[in-house]
Image (cartoon, coloured by chain):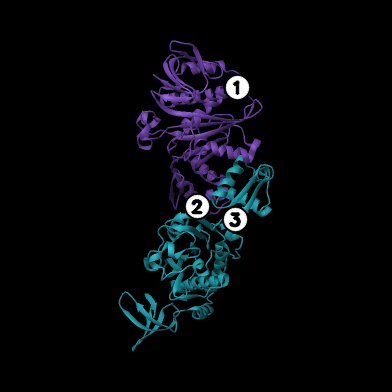
Chain colours: A purple, B cyan
Amino acid sequence: MTQTLFDVLRILDEAGIGHPVPGEVISERLGITRTAVWKYVNLLREIGYRIDAQPKTGYSLEKRSWLLLPYEVKRYLKTQVIGQEMHHFEQVPSTDALARQLLHEVGDEVAPGTVLVAEQQTGGIGRMNRVWMSPEGGIWATIVLMPKLNVDQTFTIMMAGSLALARAIRQEFGLSALIKWPNDVFIGDKKVAGMTIELTADDDILRYCLVGVGIDVNVSVEKTMPNISNLVTSISDELGHEVERAEFFARFLKEFERRYNMVLKGETEPLFREWRSLSCTLHRRVRIRTVRESFDGEAIDIDEHGALIVHRDGGEVERVIAGDCFML
Amino acid sequence: MTQTLFDVLRILDEAGIGHPVPGEVISERLGITRTAVWKYVNLLREIGYRIDAQPKTGYSLEKRSWLLLPYEVKRYLKTQVIGQEMHHFEQVPSTDALARQLLHEVGDEVAPGTVLVAEQQTGGIGRMNRVWMSPEGGIWATIVLMPKLNVDQTFTIMMAGSLALARAIRQEFGLSALIKWPNDVFIGDKKVAGMTIELTADDDILRYCLVGVGIDVNVSVEKTMPNISNLVTSISDELGHEVERAEFFARFLKEFERRYNMVLKGETEPLFREWRSLSCTLHRRVRIRTVRESFDGEAIDIDEHGALIVHRDGGEVERVIAGDCFML
């Protein structure tokens, strides 16, 4: 959404839903022709706003867009930094790839906390380079961070993300979201959201950190990914109806910022406590599959680097740094 | 194209093709963030501009868009009124329908001479409500006029249009375009451009006049309308290569404005003379088909209302007001 388009929308919005604003008023306030106002109104209609036009009384906003437009998210956004700069895309290969291109072209001048969000990804990638289905209705976003932290803090950033996801889902929709090690968000035994994290570091110090988030919000799993419908769910499938994405996303960003600030200040202990309380992995029998081997045991805890501590059946206590974890 | 997008393009353009402008410079001049600059550059790329990005030196415009964007047309436009306000659309049902919607919503505040232009029409309508194929590469446009003229001047406005089309094609591409009565432009025995005219009148005085223009410029007739390739041609088919549309369209608008001003001043005699000199219908044996009948004869002249005067084989001299005319 470009500046003038946003200005036209703001004028209609300030008048209130259903209250017409004469085209001349918009034209004068923005210093554009009446035909330009008409063109912008048509562009707003194209991105999902319902705007009525009465030759006598003017244009009235009747219904908001269903798109996850920064303008809509910002109506609810209460953060200081995260998402204050936000850019929306219709269909992109992946928001992570876009963020890499952004950093390549703009570098250090990218505002920390910039969020790129897309309606649809054609080449979404999940953890361990797996294909991540990203149909319309979900939230596919990347948060660009420049934390002055050591690379060994990566897990705590990820933890801030998955906690924020689980909390936002619980608060906004009343669903019992839990975290499956390392960073997936589950409702019951099905995944509803996931995260990736991508780093650039100078020596040990993080330079950029891209937090990729994928949330199946208004997604019919049966329709869009029938072959994995036993593993995946969505907010709308759980609730039986579609929900407002903008308010939820704003809440997630707020929840994330609060915890990310704790990470920056080194106050990570409360995050570990919260993680343990929202984990669906701990104190459960699990099957661990790493590149080397596969074994069963009981998940006991995580350590400060995010490794899962597993009491192997009839054996030792092991640290699992990377791998898949199946609940038995 | 919205204002800020246009501003970014203008800054790159002023630097010159291949000359980079640092992102910071654009950012400061427009009062937008560096990431917003990046987003606008990406939007410009999406609408066909090739823009290189070097982290050290900045963004450079390398190649202009192939779209018929107002910004590109205006680089060549030498009119006073026609096309000074111009709006571009990607794909629309028809620019005439858009213009009607514009007039309905904006009314008398539409600037006279406003031009709506589209890359593609999905429901283009030609003369006598016939389907008008409007593929990419052509020029599909509507000019909104508010002439204070009597409705009986409609034909002279149409004449101004078809003359401007034929002249612009001749001047720009050196092709022998002629006018087939009433208002089609032909090269040899194939149609290359057509016009429609749509009126609103209060009593006898024209209120609005929508001049619809369709020109097959960069269109492969064989590929896009193979079933009528014996009747239709295009500029690129005639020349064997694609051409620059923006400069040609600017020239057409200039040629049209000059003749339209003559119509407004009542100086129509020179237009009739020019029309006669560029007609491929006059002094030819023709077959006339009207709703009532069909007959052969020789086309002798047109009268001041645009009716074709035909000397019917072995009979009278007839005035044909509306109908199809086939050259024998």
Mark 2, residue position? A39
Q: Of circles 3 and 1, which is in front?
A: 1
Residue A94 coordinates in the image, percent (x, y)? 51, 38
- The answer to whether residue B111 is above or below residue B310 is above
What secondary structure is marked by label 2?
A: helix
Any part of residue B183 in sight: no
The answer to whether one can see residue A305 in this image is yes
**Left or right side of B270 for B294:** left
Q: Which residue is mark 1?
A: A152
Q: Chain of mark 1?
A: A
Q: Position of residue A5 (x, y in %)?
A: 53, 46
Chain on which label 2 sits: A
Q: Is there CB contact under 8 Å for labels 1 and 2?
A: no
Task: Identify which residue, B298 or B265, lies in the foreground.
Answer: B298
Q: Which residue is mark 3?
A: B64
Amino acid type of the residue tagged 1 in the rendering: Asp
Please tell me how crowded label 3 is: few (under 14), some (14-19), or many (20+) other residues with Cα within 10 Å.
some
Q: Amino acid at mark 3?
A: Arg
